[in-house]
């Protein structure tokens, strides 16, 4: 799998050859506070099998939220004391547009589709939080190029919705009255990574941050139009997953206190195989295989940085 290969390469790059000499700044305490805002695009997909053993159909049902347009607000802080680094960030995003497709199949590998509906994904939201510890090292040239290996904890959430549905395959009955279903994905993770800062000129610096996550995944869904399902939790997904995040940024120095940050970020998460546990209205439950979950997004941001 490409993600696992990338994870192995990243781990080697982060930890081999780290120099032993730390940077010594003019002050024992440094503080950077940043606020970035901007648009993003995202997508979430998951599918389940007929049973735990993958018998036909190996993909029974698949849900895809695509073309999610998101406006995100990100807050970050970095505190450095004697080259010991503490970083934290919190982000929130509003899904302003997007679509959902819900498809069911009779045969393997998404063939003989017997049901398909589309719905609106507007109204969902995203949340992220992270905290990490690390150490700042010099790679050469005084403080012109620094490396900060990091180890941290993170939590990410994607709250997806389905409204204004339309049934288009078997039977093509048109609008789905009263659709208001939800699927809330939670990723709790430990991660390792690094931040690299490079001074290009006196007033311009380049930053690169990469992170590799090992995650526990759980999602709770409410399928409001299924009277045979329990509510407000109709089914739960559980799995183990991996995530990769990366950001590249440019900081333009305004004065000794302020800078302007422009950033581009990308993330990819996947989980599975795992369990799909469906709760019935009579108190019983059924278990089948969750084949996979995939979340991906890209974001851009701009905002001020306060340096102390």
Image: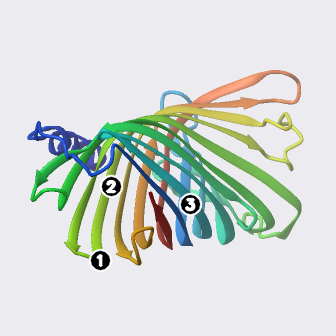
The relative height of residue 47 versus residue 288 in the rendered view (above or below) is below
Q: Residue at x 48, y 28 (%)?
A: 53
- Based on the displayed image, in which of its 4 quarters is residue 203 positioned? bottom left
**What is the secondary structure assignment of the residue under circle 1?**
loop
Is residue 237 visible from the viewing direction of this image?
A: yes
Q: Is residue 195 left or right of residue 268?
A: left
In the visual, does 76 lie left or right of 86? right
Give the side of residue 202 with respect to residue 265, left or right: left
- Residue at mark 3: 74
Residue 191 in sight: no
Tell me the CA gap for discs 3 and 2.
Answer: 15 Å
User: Which residue is pictured at 85% across the width and 21% down the height?
Assistant: 283
* The N terminus lies in quadrant: top left
Image quarter hosting the C terminus? bottom left
**Disc nearer the start of the sequence (1/2):** 1
Residue matched to label 2:
209
C-alpha separation, residue under disc 1 versus residue under disc 3: 23 Å
- Counting residues from the start of the chain, the first of labels 3 and 2 encountered is 3
Residue labelled with disc 1: 203
**Whole-percent x, y for residue 174 in the image:** 82, 72
Outermost front residue: 26
Vertical comparison of 32 with 38: above or below? above
Return the x and y of residue 235 as percentages of the image width and height.
72, 35
Q: Position of residue 149 (x, y in %)?
A: 27, 41
Local packing at callout 2 (Cα closer than 10 Å; few below 14, some 14-19, many 20+) is some
Which quarter of the figure has residue 84? top left
For marks 1 and 2, give the CA distance. 20 Å
Secondary structure of the residue carrying tag 2 is strand
């Amino acid at each position: 799998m490409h993600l696992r290969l990338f994870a192995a390469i990243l781990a080697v790059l982060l930890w081999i050859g780290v120099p032993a000499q730390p940077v010594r700044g003019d002050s024992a305490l440094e503080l950077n506070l940043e606020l970035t805002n901007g648009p993003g695009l995202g997508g979430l997909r998951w599918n389940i099998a007929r049973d735990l053993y993958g018998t036909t159909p190996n993909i029974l049902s698949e849900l895809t939220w695509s073309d999610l347009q998101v406006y995100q607000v990100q807050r970050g802080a970095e505190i450095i004391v004697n080259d010991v680094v503490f970083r934290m960030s919190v982000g929130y995003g509003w899904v302003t547009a997007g679509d959902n497709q819900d498809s069911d199949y009779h045969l393997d590998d998404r063939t003989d589709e017997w049901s398909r509906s589309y719905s609106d994904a507007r109204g969902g939201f995203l949340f992220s939080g992270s905290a990490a510890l690390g150490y700042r090292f010099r790679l050469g040239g005084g403080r012109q190029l620094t490396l900060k290996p990091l180890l941290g904890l993170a939590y990410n959430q994607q709250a997806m919705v389905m409204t204004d549905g339309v049934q288009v395959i078997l039977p093509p009955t048109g609008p789905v009255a009263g659709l208001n279903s939800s699927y809330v994905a939670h990723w709790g993770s430990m991660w390792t990574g690094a931040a690299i800062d490079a001074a290009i000129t006196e007033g311009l610096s380049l930053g690169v941050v990469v992170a590799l996550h090992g995650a526990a995944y759980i999602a709770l869904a409410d399928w409001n139009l299924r009277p045979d399902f329990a509510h407000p939790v109709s089914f739960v997904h559980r799995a183990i997953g991996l995530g990769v995040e990366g950001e590249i940024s440019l900081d333009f120095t305004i004065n000794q206190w302020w800078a302007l940050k422009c950033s581009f970020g990308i993330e990819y998460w996947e989980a599975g195989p795992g369990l799909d546990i469906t709760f019935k209205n009579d108190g019983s439950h059924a278990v089948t295989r969750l084949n996979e979950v995939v979340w991906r997004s890209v974001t851009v941001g701009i905002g001020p940085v306060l340096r102390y």
